[in-house]
Amino acid sequence: MVLYRNQYINYIRRKPLALLAPITVLLFIYFLLFGTSASTSSSSSKSTPKYSYDKKSKSWFTSNNKDSVMVKNLPKNHIAHYDLNKLTSSANALAKKEEVLILTPMTKFLPEYWDNLNKLTYDHSLISLGFIFPRTEEGDEALKNLETALKKSKASNTLNFKKVTLLRQDSNSLGSQLEKDRHAFKVQKERRSMMALARNSLVFSTISPSTSWILWLDADIVETPPTLIQDMVAHNKPVLSANVYQRFYDEEKQQQSIRPYDFNNWVESEEGLKLAAGLGDDEIIVEGYAEMATYRALMAHFYDANQDVNTEMPLDGVGGGAVMVKADVHRDGAMFPSFPFYHLIETEGFAKMAKRLGYEVIGLPNYLVYHHNE
Ligand SMILES: Nc1nc2c(ncn2[C@@H]2O[C@H](COP(=O)(O)OP(=O)(O)OP(=O)(O)O)[C@@H](O)[C@H]2O)c(=O)[nH]1
Ligand SMILES: [Mg+2]
């Protein structure tokens, strides 16, 4: 053996150039086969983005197509299939493990809102949460408070939601959110159109291919039945709005009482249509203002404690307090117009758009949720 090896070594010592030909052939074959991937590994060792969409390097056997890209370093689940035909939103959502996305635009964090949300009895692992905060001091404060609440829940192992998304708004908001400023008639168009932009950013950034239902729940809704989700999906309606009331202390009767709060759930009236017909293209109707008497039937006034809690009534406008929407309604393109749409904007414009897409909009006059009392 030793002799055999020595023979070879002796031969190479005598004629070193004899190695040149086989080495060249080997190198040629190597670059031909691995030329492009060899350049990958050297570039990916630098701190490049996780996925690189480099232009394919020109090699001898590939065409010089400048637009073709190489997608590298992909995780195993990079290509995901979802059959939207198989995604259901049904009356027995919980049994079918349908996912619910709860969306809340938030200027103020109320602990009562958070406690109520956490008490919802729908399986939390099927619930995702999405929040959007304005770029104001108030928004900063609300975000900080929600983060603290999230940390606390996490520390006590009670944060079981599938996913929580916190968004900072890129559009503008009103500076002052004091009750009297928020409700002044002249600021409504601007205020509601800003809220529409916030709602649109929120839904378009958080809806996923597995979302079956979207529950719009305002940050000032502080009390709902714990079975809110099950109760609402049981109606199996594309858009379903609960009746927003408020608890207060009745000085006259010297006792706790309730009163209607949200007047954005309404049925269109002849007067409302006439009013709209007389408006300029850019003018809007906002419900609940004496400046614009519409004589619409307001769901808030239809509450009857002695009637069936599941009574339904068709609506033309909805508020944003607690509205359950089949995710397909949003997927089909229904959003919150920030511009006059049939002279309506935000949630009221959304109801109109859902109807124009062919969906039913329904209200539950006897199903109450409660708005915060400032
Ligand atoms: N991200 C964001 N959220 C907002 C903004 N304005 C209001 N919100 C939130 O949007 C929801 C509805 O706002 P509200 O101010 O309660 O509007 P409203 O219910 O029409 O009026 P109120 O009678 O005052 O309750 C609440 O959850 C607010 O916290 C805003 O500019 N940006
Ligand atoms: Mg409100």
Image (spheres, rainbow, N blue to C red):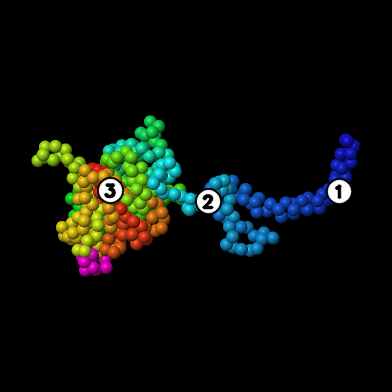
* Mark with earlier residue (2, 1): 1
Residue receiving disc 1:
15
Residue receiving disc 2:
81
Q: Secondary structure at mark 1?
A: loop
How far apart marks 2 and 1 lie (CA) works out to: 61 Å
Q: Residue furthest left?
A: 252
Q: Secondary structure at mark 3?
A: loop
**In front of the other: 34 or 146:** 146
- Please say if 150 is above or below 321: above
Disc 3 crowd, CA 10 A, few/some/many (<14, 14-19, 20+):
some
Disc 1 crowd, CA 10 A, few/some/many (<14, 14-19, 20+):
few
Residue receiving disc 3:
311
Dot in front, 2 or 3 = 3
- Please say if 345 is above or below 165: below
Give the residue displayed 34% in from the left and 62% down from the top.
356
Q: Amino acid at mark 3?
A: Thr
The region drawn magenta spans: 272-282
Q: Position of residue 272 (x, y in %)?
A: 21, 62
Q: Does residue 170 appear anywhere in the picture?
A: no
